[in-house]
Image: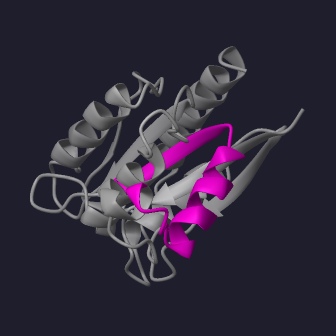
Amino acid sequence: MTKKVALTVGSLRKKSYTRAIATQAAALLPGGFELVNVKISDLALYNQDFDDEKKVPESWQRFRQQMADIDAVIFATPEYNRSMPAALKNALDVGSRPIGQSVWNGKPALIISVSIGGIAGFGANHHLRQSLVFLNMPVVAQPEVYIGNVRNLLDDNLKITNPGTIAFLQTAINTFADLVKRFS
């Protein structure tokens, strides 16, 4: 049976390095996996009043339905101010509510953090990891995927030029695929 894997990217920029790396990594998934690009840019900010008053925005409804049909998630995040971007945190919040109806519960995850700097999104990766632990998502522990100095790894078309980076991403994707199979 085919497993649906959501690609959820915290960078909303048109020429996002994070999306470029994540898309190329996700393309390394083995057979038996279907990739679903999940849009988070239009999600209204989470406000519990919308759930309590049964005035749930259409964007939340679409997102929650789409994620309910997903088996696993690849999260890709840049680092903003030593943490994940607001759009990604908002998606986590929207998907985790109403309480007891989280779309994230039990879904295996892989975190990829990307940065133009040498620290490689360490802060964002670990803040996201902390949230995923609370959301009961088994996360690939090793290898941890930090892609630093990303501009040195991509050509003008945002394609990865470093064979070592591709090999590393393949190892991470293989580990993720094994995790998904174990939790099926």
In the shown orientation, is residue 30 left or right of residue 10?
right
Q: Residue at x 43, y 46 (%)?
A: 97
User: Is residue 152 magenta-colored?
Assistant: no
Q: Residue at x 56, y 43 (%)?
A: 73
User: Is residue 61 magenta-colored?
Assistant: yes
Q: Name the colour scheme.
A: one colour
Q: Residue at x 49, y 62 (%)?
A: 54
Above or below — where is 91 with respect to 112? below
Residue 49 lies, in percent from the top left, at: 32, 61
In the shown orientation, is residue 176 left or right of residue 27?
left
In the shown orientation, is residue 59 left or right of residue 147?
right
Q: Quadrant of residue 139?
A: top left
Residue 134 lies, in percent from the top left, at: 33, 28
Q: Residue at x 20, y 43 (%)?
A: 122
- Residue furthest to the front in view is 53
Q: Nearer the viewer, residue 155 or 112?
A: 112
Above or below — where is 147 with respect to 130? below
Residue 29 lies, in percent from the top left, at: 70, 43
In the shown orientation, is residue 166 left or right of residue 48?
right
For the record, the magenta segment spans 52-77
- Residue furthest to the top in view is 182
